[in-house]
Amino acid sequence: MRNPNPPPKKQVGQGRRPRRIAGQLELDLRGAAELTGLAAGSLRARVRRRTIPFRRLGGRILFPKDDLIAFFGALPGVTLAEARENEARRTGAE
């Protein structure tokens, strides 16, 4: 049965922008995937295993940008900036 009073449709671009919560920039799944270079499915798997910093707002998964950068910066190996440079070199994009 359909809802007689469905919620209004989202505006173009609504729900795709980073949000500020308590002064901290929060990224949605797509924004976190762009920042880290990981696939959305990989990020979801890390959230399920609770191996990455995240928050839930209702049904949405949000990633604090500063916490994500610090988390990936603390991992041994290549830094996030170095990984981006390597990817740009491999793909020919500058």
Image: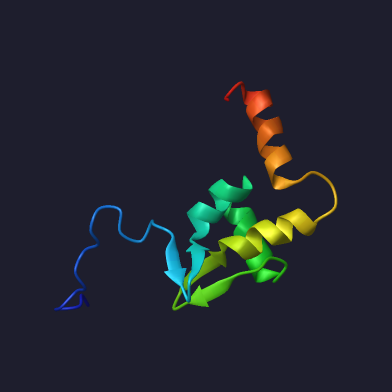
Q: Quadrant of residue 75?
A: bottom right
Q: How is the image coloured?
A: rainbow
Which residue is located at x 75 percent, y 54 percent? 73
Residue 83 higher or lower than 21, as above or below:
above
Q: Position of residue 31 (x, y in %)?
A: 50, 53
Q: Residue at x 65, y 68 (%)?
A: 53
Residue at 57% x, 24% y is 93
Residue displayed at 44% across by 78% down: 58
Q: Is residue 38 visible?
A: no
Q: Nearer the viewer, residue 6 or 61?
A: 61
Relative to 38, residue 23 above or below: below
Residue extending farthest to the left is 4
Query: Which residue appears farthest toward the front when viewing the image?
Result: 23
For residue 37, side relative to residue 24 (left or right): right
Outermost residue to the right: 76
x then y, percent, for residue 60: 46, 70
- Residue 68, given in percent of the width and then of the height, sits at 64, 60
Decide if residue 43 is in sight here.
yes
Q: Quadrant of the C terminus?
A: top right
Taking 25 as reference, is 76 left or right?
right
Q: Determine whether, in the image, residue 12 is placed left or right of residue 54.
A: left
- The one nearer the camera, 18 or 42, is 18
Is residue 79 depicted above or below 51 in this figure? Answer: above
Residue 12 percent location from the top left of the image = 25, 53
Q: Is residue 61 above or below residue 1?
A: above
